[in-house]
Image: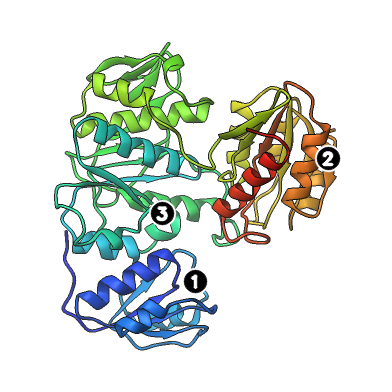
Amino acid sequence: MSGLPNPGRALVIGLARSGHAAAVLLHRRGWQVVAVDSAPVEAGDLRAAGIEVRAPSDEAVPADLVIRSPGVPQGSAPLAAAYATGTPVWSEIELASRAMPNPVMGVTGTNGKTTTTVLLAHLLREGGLDAVACGNVGTPMSGLVGQVPADRWLVVECSSFQLEDSPTLHPRAAVLLNVTPDHMDRYPDLDAYRRAKTNLFANQGPGDLAIVPEGLDVPGGAAVHRVADGPDPGPAAVAWAEGGLHVRGLGRVAAWQDIPLYGAHNRQNVMAAAAMAAHAGVGAGDIARALATFPGVPHRLEVVGAAGGVTFVNDSKATNPAAAIAALDAYPQRVRLIAGGSSKGTPFDALARAAHGPVDHAYLIGETGPDLAAALTACGIPCTVLPDLATAVGRAAREAVPGDVVLLAPACASFDQFAGYEERGEAFRRAALEHGAG
């Protein structure tokens, strides 16, 4: 823990969950806080506490410290002014990690972060350790400062945006699950996106655990390990799939059929979480029992019900093509795919190729509907562009036959029609229930 500097004037840019929590924490620590957002926001509690709120505002604000929320782009005027004057710019997780002594485990990657984060916290708790999932999922880290005991493990889901401004974050164990094109509307190329992800490892030392994809170099002083989905793990593997889950030092932990998570991508998530739990001291028996009882994560391959032999699956958290491809891997039977949303600048060619075979028909919505239709049609997949999610669910439900899966795997962000993937997933759930799923 590096600690916080003496109180001065702080600027918090962006007032979603993490920015709100950062503003409250700084105010409690004696800072004069100015909180800004480019859009109107409800911040009555901040104003009542004595925090100056300017929203909407894009004006530069002189400050001694700037906290940047994940969604704030580089071109933001207040942020650009901070960089120009050399003012320290931190993420909210950097702020929180400096303010609390708790041991941290970090999880990043393009896909699988939330499942792995929530699963790892579950494994730690079932192994007798106090742990909470936080960061980019659940409670912002800053909201836990002063609220949890100092020995509670913080399992932190870290986005690339957060890791851009986290210069002292030091996780005892960290994993980069995968890197595929995402957020190409924010990064100039895939290398820049990858570099942001690898910042998670920069402050690790020899006693820490680093898990990364094969062939990827990362900064920091920890030995690099990997997970291997096959019978020949190699000397660097810390966990592998060989007729079941194996973890280095523990041996065979569980049979895959006893773990209620589907798809090759979830094998990777399970291996990473199990290896990190073992690093914290959780034994094989506790890991096996915890895996068998893991309830899964809402909006991630979540079965919301069935009607007339048709299963409805909510994978609203599949906000990029690679995540949607993973969903199709988990459900290779006849699929009626609902996809589309707001653009993140990623191409859809690979998704279209993966959809050839499992997808009988695609129902496409949102800003990217026409682009998805072009890619899917080129691969011979029948598709229909529709105005909204409720219409798409209704059409898919009417046309589905017993044995089909109506799968929401949007491959896109949700912000053209919804406030976030959670709201989109709940809308899918309601629509499925209206068509008899239960």
Is 277 above or below relative to 188?
A: above
Tell me how far mark 1 sits from mark 3, CA to CA. Answer: 19 Å
- Location of the C terminus by quadrant is top right
Per the image, the residue denoted by label 1 is: 74
Mark in the foreground, 1 or 3: 3
Classify mark 2: residues with Cα within 10 Å, few (<14), some (14-19) or many (20+).
many
- Location of the N terminus by quadrant is bottom left
Mark in the foreground, 2 or 1: 2
In the rendered image, is residue 167 in sight? no
Dot 3 lies on which element?
Answer: loop
The part of the image, by quadrant, that contains residue 65 is bottom left
Per the image, the residue denoted by label 2 is: 383
- Identify residue type, mark 2: Cys
Earlier in the chain: of badge 2 and badge 1, it is 1
Spot occupied by residue 101 in the image (x, y as percentages of width and height) = 15, 55
Residue 166, numbered label: none
Spot occupied by residue 233 in the image (x, y as percentages of width and height) = 38, 19
Is 414 above or below relative to 180?
A: below
- Identify residue type, mark 1: Gln
Residue 136, numbered label: 3
Dot 1 lies on which element?
Answer: loop
The one of 366 and 238 positioned closer to us in this rendering: 366
